[in-house]
Image: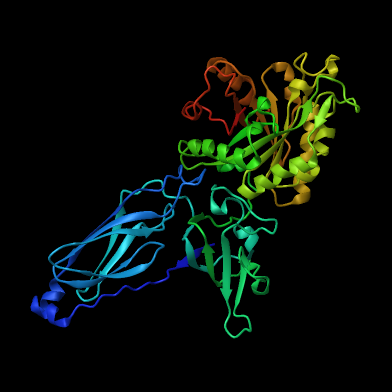
Amino acid sequence: MRVTSNRILVGLVALVGIASLFATGGPASAAAAACQASVEAVHATPSNNGLIPAPIGPLSTPLSIEVSCDLPTEIDLRLPGGESSGHVVDSEAPLRLKGERAYICHGHDASVEVESEALGWAESVPISGLNGIPQCDLMLREGATAVHWTGPQMALRDVFAGRALGWVNWERGADGTVPGLAVWSFIDGQPLPAKGWGEGVAPMLGGLTHFRPGGEYLVVSDVERAWTFPRPASVRSVFEDAQVVSFYGYPGIPAMGVLGHGTPAEVANAVAEWAAHYDMLNGPREVIPAYHLITGVAQAYPTRDGTWLSRLSHDRIAEYVEAARERDMILFLDVQIGWSDPLAEVQLLEPFLREPFVHMALDPEFATEHLGVRPGLAIGGIWGEQINEVQHYLARLVEEEGDIPPKILMVHQFAAKMIQNRSDVVDVEGVEVMIDMDGFGGIRLKLRHYDWYALTEPSERPALKLFFDQDTPVMTPEQVQALDQVPDLIMYQ
């Protein structure tokens, strides 16, 4: 899929008299004459390696441009993603321009085209001093950006969903529209020559619903936005191309983990910053931010159903499902088991687990029925056979959905008794078992347990949990990425 931006040309053409051209040597001299140009970025966009965690002002790059020519002449400037403009260069002094802006995404051609038709001279001048350019496919300017869509037919609400517009205060209306964004299509020969979608589109002019291959559209935005085009869903493991960085906890309860320190949007912005830090350290591998949401909380007092569990409502879980969908995040649903059966608790979450980005986590620490004590009085455990039951159930969901990636089944462990009969855990197609080394303390002990539990069978993918308050000290992303066997998932509590 490819989208190209049609630049809106604003010609500021100045005229140079033919007499002045001949006065400096005539056409023969003009053919031999030339110009020199330099282009420098005044400042680069601070974008955390492309992931934009907070409003940071304009995303475009201001330029300082200098052009000097042997003869007075007209020149045309064409800026990447921006506009074209005409200027006059005096041979006695260079032309210096400030305030021109380039709209560049990471990996795009970062150069300015400078041309003097009269002198028969043209040059593509690289922009020096660039860094931190947004990781996107197209920069939307403040105002109107013309777009020629060459991708597949796609609903507009999907085109501008998820990471499409970066991490800047992401929000959408119930109908999928984005505040401050509208799309227009113009059709000749129709009673109403324009159709629109988005904010500010009058009902009578509505009706635009899709981008279609070969279509011409005008995207109008109230701010500059870095736009990433949607990619087709992958059925590969998420870990094939990416690490995951997650925030663990329970909504509104900070003591249970950092997820409880804010709204879904606030937590997403925070974990995105940590993900961006890891992304700068792990080479070509991407990093996907994640929520790790406790949905079944072990209780110190018996519950009516005898499970010693308090369950998060489906409405509240759905808030995190939708937030994860909007931002292309992963969501883990975590059950502390209590006196319940692991499979029964997982089955209660089936509507969410059918989503391709929602995965499962089991916490055996609070599974204490076999000990005859309430959760929290002793370290509990589950059996390999119980893990297999959950695996087979998740594999059935993957098979029924048909086009979703393998389900991740995370099991927390920091003591041997938490997973009894580890050798009985089998390899089930469509499910990846991930053991998360869940203990806190000093780095040496943490890494010893990481070796014992996360890096050995049946763990197919290692995970490491870091505790902001209890670890002494908290490992830095640099220390984590320097491990001989780097975790596929890093979780913060």
Quadrant in the picture for the C terminus: top right
The percent coordinates of residue 335 (x first, y second) are 76, 30
Q: Is residue 114 left or right of residue 23?
A: right
The percent coordinates of residue 68 (x first, y second) are 18, 63
The percent coordinates of residue 66 (x first, y second) are 23, 59
Question: Can residue 164 be seen by looking at this rendering?
Answer: yes
Residue 486 vs 69, above or below: the answer is above
- The residue lying at 69 percent from left, 17 percent from top is 415
Q: Residue furthest bottom?
A: 189
Quadrant in the picture for the N terminus: bottom right
Q: Is residue 210 left or right of residue 129?
A: right
| Total number of numbered discs in the rendering | 0
- The residue lying at 42 percent from left, 53 percent from top is 107
Q: Nearer the viewer, residue 402 or 72?
A: 72
Residue 76 vs 41, above or below: the answer is below
The percent coordinates of residue 122 (x first, y second) are 25, 68
